[in-house]
Amino acid sequence: MPLPEFNSYTDRVLTHIKFRYDHEGIRQELNEHLEDMTEDYMSEGMTENEAVSMAVLNMGDPDEIGEELNKAHSPLLGIVWLAAKWLAGAVVLFSLFSFVFYAVNIIGNITRDYDDRQDAEIVYTVQVGEKFLIDDMNLRIDEAVYYDDNTLEVRYMTWDRPFSDSISWSFHIGSECFYDEKGNSYFSGSGGSGGGPFTKHYTRIEDFPADAEKLIVDYDFNGRKVYCEIPLKEGAVYEADK
């Protein structure tokens, strides 16, 4: 704890420094210098009182030191420094908030289940898990869901490879690339949800036969290919059995 002599000296110096925000830092620095000088004098054989008096004396005139420090700690420069500090803090907080929001959004997109239709009942679900790479985009076909209105819904997720410099582009497994085991082709309508780097999609094929054994995905467009055979009966998990 600073001695009373030290506090009296630093108080006198601080009366000349107008930017009060720096007072505590200056006080601490001055007291540390005085304490170091006192220890040096005591190591030379002085008593504590003698060493304290000599340290205060040799620190210099407090008024002159205060005026010089006031030039270095001018209010204008101090305000600019404070404003820059607060702005930097605000930027850091905003960046941290943005990162957390972005991370939560990504985790939510990955872990969130696909939305089931409300206007029809699920008959069975087939888990797929087939993965593909199209340019720098990953594609994973997650599952096929068959509804009681004879609609087959194919659910899949897309995401770009990390640090990819390719231009992002919209992708959907569209019509005329779905077949059954007999070679019949089917039209479909697409949709998606999620946004961000991970997007979940669905493609709905209407009037798909309930007794079909297999769904074949055969996408071939501009050299980009996806081929997958999904066994519907073998891998089906029926809602009635759950």
Image (cartoon, helix red, strand yellow):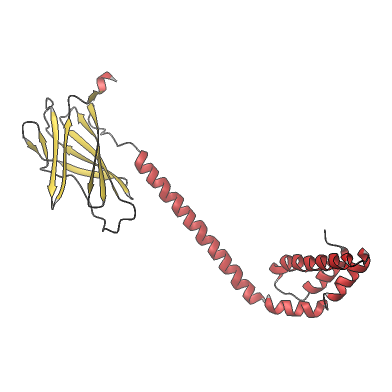
Q: Residue at x 20, y 35 (%)?
A: 153
Residue 12 is situated, as x and y percent measured from the top left of the image, at 82, 73
* Number of numbered discs overlaid on the protein picture: 0
| Figure quadrant of residue 213 | top left
| Figure quadrant of residue 2 | bottom right
Quarter placement of the N terminus: bottom right
Instruction: Please identify the residue farthest to the top as the structure is shown.
Output: 241
Residue 121 visible in rendering: no
Residue 219 visible in rendering: yes
Q: Residue at x 81, y 70 (%)?
A: 10
On screen, residue 69 above or below 45: below
Residue 180 is situated, as x and y percent measured from the top left of the image, at 10, 33
Q: Residue at x 83, y 68 (%)?
A: 37
Instruction: Please identify the residue farthest to the front as the structure is shown.
Output: 44
| Figure quadrant of residue 186 | top left
On screen, residue 226 above or below 67: above
Quarter placement of the C terminus: top left
Residue 183 is situated, as x and y percent measured from the top left of the image, at 5, 34
Residue 100 is situated, as x and y percent measured from the top left of the image, at 46, 50
